[in-house]
Image: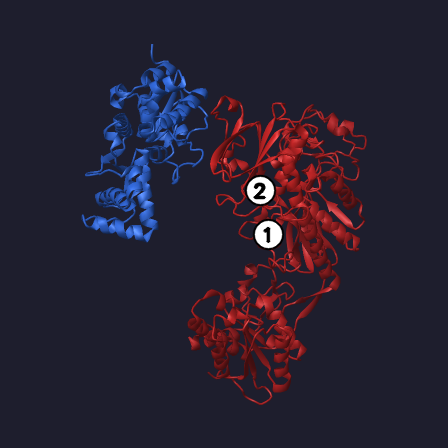
Chain colours: A blue, B red
Amino acid sequence: MHYLYYPGCSLKATGRPYEESLLAVMRELGVDVEELADWSCCGATTYMGVDENQAFALAARNLALAERNCSDGCANLMAPCNACYLVLNKAKHYVAEYPEVRERVTGALKSIDLNYRGDVAVRHPLDIITNDIGLEAVGKHVKRPLTGLKVACYYGCQIVRPYSTFDNQYNPTSMDELLRALGAEVVEWPLKTRCCGGALTGTVPNTGQRLSYFLLKEARRAGASLVATCCPLCQHNLECYQDEIEHDFAEHGQPAVAYFTQLMGLAMGLRPAELGLQRMLTPVQRVALQATGSES
Amino acid sequence: MNIPLSTKKDEVRIGVYVCHCGMNIAGKVHIDALRDFAKTLPGVTISRDFKFMCSDSGQELLADDIKKHGVNRVVVASCSPLLHEGTFRGALVKAGLNPFFYQMANIREHVAWVTNDRDLATEKAKALIAGAVRRAARALALEKKRVNVQKDILIVGGGIAGIHAALNLAESGKHVYLVEREPTIGGHMAQFDKTFPTLDCAACILTPKMSAVKNHPNITLWTYSEVEEVSGFSGNFKVRVRRNPRYIKEELCVGCNECIDACVFKKGKTLDEFNVGLSQRKPIYSPFPQATPALVVIDPNSCLELMKGKCKKSCVDACERAAIDFEQQARIENIDVGAIILSTGFKTFDPTRIPEYGYGKYNNVYTTLEVERLVNASGPTQGELVLRDGSRPKSAAVIHCVGSRDRRYNPHCSSVCCMASLKIAHLIKERTGADVFNFYIDMRTPLKGYEEFYDQVLSEGVQFIRGRPAEVTDWALTPSEEGKLVVRVEDTLLGTPRRIPVDMVVLAVGLEAQADAEAVQRVFNISCSRDGFFLERHPKLGPVSTFSDGIFLAGACQGPKDIPATVAQAGAAAAEALCMVDKGYVEIEPNTAWINADECSGCKTCIPLCPFRAISRDEQRKVAVINEALCKGCGTCVGACPSGAAQQNLFTNEQIYEEIEGVLSYV
């Protein structure tokens, strides 16, 4: 299996632990991952509001690069950030479904000698790991099962809406199944796809942090000691404002927050430094190891 | 083009009539051009156009030409044969001509209604008329055959539809076989507590009809039975019914229920179907107190004796009449009937398909059918409306349109849920005094007394919130929401999202076709519409008949319906079935296939292909023979015959080739 990897801006900055753990896990699973050369910003969700045409062209540039990179059939472009995943998918859908968008986008790409055919598949690593690689194969690599760790799986709003290509739109379960395969105990909670606050934590902090607060509170109420994420912005919001949330909402004893790929790495026996655990603001390693009884 | 116009006597004189159909056809094609074109075709002696050919004056026009101008073949260019072929054939008969000298050119459905280009439409209509004229020139006289019909009638499904139809027919003196799959008749109506809008007790109005069915000398009631096979044809159906063993000798059991009390299971362990899983029943049981017939039944999937052969069989000891028979086998009954009424009902939407409503996840989310049982005196709580933890709800939400009017599940409106939701809201309010919130998209209360009932429920203080809820969650935002279910909804009248915390949520589940509707459809050789319900012959003018003659529909198997509409349709189905069998005969269309014995090699290719099992082999002459009474004229054998020995009336090779050539010669 060969995957082109589209990091997007986050995985090279605030989301570095996500990149480090994802690549380490893929290496361990023997999956061939190659970073897309010369990738550019996806436009994120904000550019759409400024100029849709330019936003689609910018996103489609990455899709066209992926296609050029892959001469044999359909390219699989792995986009770990939920926002990138959504924007690239949205560009793909709009170019396919709306002739006027297609005309403008292909015209823009032609001016830089790129040709977009429309047969690249934009894939989230959660999809690749659960559906292409499979839980059975993952299970074979588990050396230190996460037995005893109570996890709330948090999917965020963007990977199942509006394009629910690999999981249920209202009650996604792929991460739940993956973490169970790692030995963790997955708690049932109703906020799997609720908003984390998104960019509001930066622009209207009160509103944004309130949304993060509900997620942390409900995860704890459901019995989780750790929230697993699959998006750099979700991770950032749940992880970085815990002090403010404690102060503003008197919410104490908040759960640790980690990328699902970090938990995979821990279960597979990888070294914490390989998984970027030293960069985390919540005590992921301690919580995980305490629960599993690995820490003396 | 060489149509033999040999002798004066055999001369083909074709009349062509172009119908305007008001503006239906005239608005889309050049009528004058068609009329003038038809005049130029060989064999055509008269060509006219008329505003409505199907009107009396249109038919007289045609008859006049036959009588006064010697027209002996008629082509009407108008609508679909389904609508008016019969009309025009009748007009020919009245004018003394064989009805099969008539040919239709469909220039409405096939031309006017499917195009916007008037010139191209006219050209296509010309091609169709040219084909019809060439075919009419080759028309042959044919006779319809009459076959006597059986007088007995089969009704499948013993809900209120089947019960009402059975009683109507039995009263008229016909013998009725009523076949029901469950151990009792009564259907969904028997599970209801009250019926809208009058709030009659459902059992009080239903059970007298149930016992009337049981006691009527003209009704043979077979419960716990299923129709396995139907063969034959309209007026002469042969039906095989499988009567499943209830392990009780029906002639001995008096329904005293002593055996149920004596069962080695002191408590029920199997989910009670009648109480939609809200309680448990024993392996030997009677579905409900007024079950009809009042016979117990033993469930082979939970009875120890039937599963493992190991039980002390205390039920047998308890039965003074020795009615229990563990050796009982399924019995097959073969019956001959003239007409069949299907009243197989509906199933309710499975709300676990909408995970965001939390059915099956949260204990206090119920369906409307479950609440019917909860408030019913013979239900699992003896009519006391309490939640699964025994507490009484102080607030409740009723969500309309669950699984209906939703492109993800069923686009159709289930028609009964608005009124059912109002009734449930009323009952919850009446029994518990709880605050009740109804979440609706549109209120649909169009029939007699319905809007008044809505008014009444409004005045009782039930709150109505317009909006389809996004989810039901136990996630509390505020202390007042702790321990409650929260309905999240956009209130589209206020234009704002709302959160309504309640103790109980009721999902007004929609109506769907039965899970095995497709299998039933195959047994009876009828069709289903896109929503899965059985397809009526015509949505307006043939609402109870099907495309299979002699098979009629009643109740919710044809589409969502409430009780008044179901009963009305059941009466209509009974009347149509009665009409058919009382006439005494059916006419068989002469478009049947036949075998030219001289050309048949006896290869048997056609025999297994015939969907109606109408072909057999004459072993003496070593040729295939077609039973005219069974042949439906589908033409499969004609197409398959390697030697061209199979031929079909009304569709001879010559007629078909002439029509094709007529169309192509113009194109």
Regarding residue A255, the answer to whether it shows in the image is no
Q: Which mark is residue B83?
A: none
Mark 2, secondary structure of its residue: loop
Q: Pick out the residue farthest to the top.
A: A296
Which one is nearer the viewer's eye here, A55 or B552? Answer: A55
In terms of depth relative to the viewer, which is nearer, B83 or A251? A251
The answer for which chain carries disc 2 is B
Position of B292 compared to A247: left or right?
Answer: right
Residue B82 placement (x, y as % from top left) = 58, 66
**Quarter where residue B383 is shown:** top right
Which amino acid, by three-letter code, is at mark 2?
Gly
Amino acid type at mark 1:
Phe
Label 2 sits on residue: B510
Residue B534 marker: 1
Nearer the camera: disc 2 or disc 1: 2
The residue sitting at 59% across, 54% down in the picture is: B535
Residue B650 point in image, percent of width and height = 57, 72
In the rendered view, does B388 fall on the left or right side of A23?
A: right
Check the picture and name the quadrant holding the C terminus of chain B.
Answer: bottom left
Farthest bottom residue in view: B8
The relative height of residue B95 versus residue B208 in the rendered view (above or below) is: below
Q: Image quarter for residue A167?
A: top left
Callout 1 secondary element: loop
Question: Is residue B564 in view from this perspective?
Answer: yes
B209 in relation to A211, above or below: below
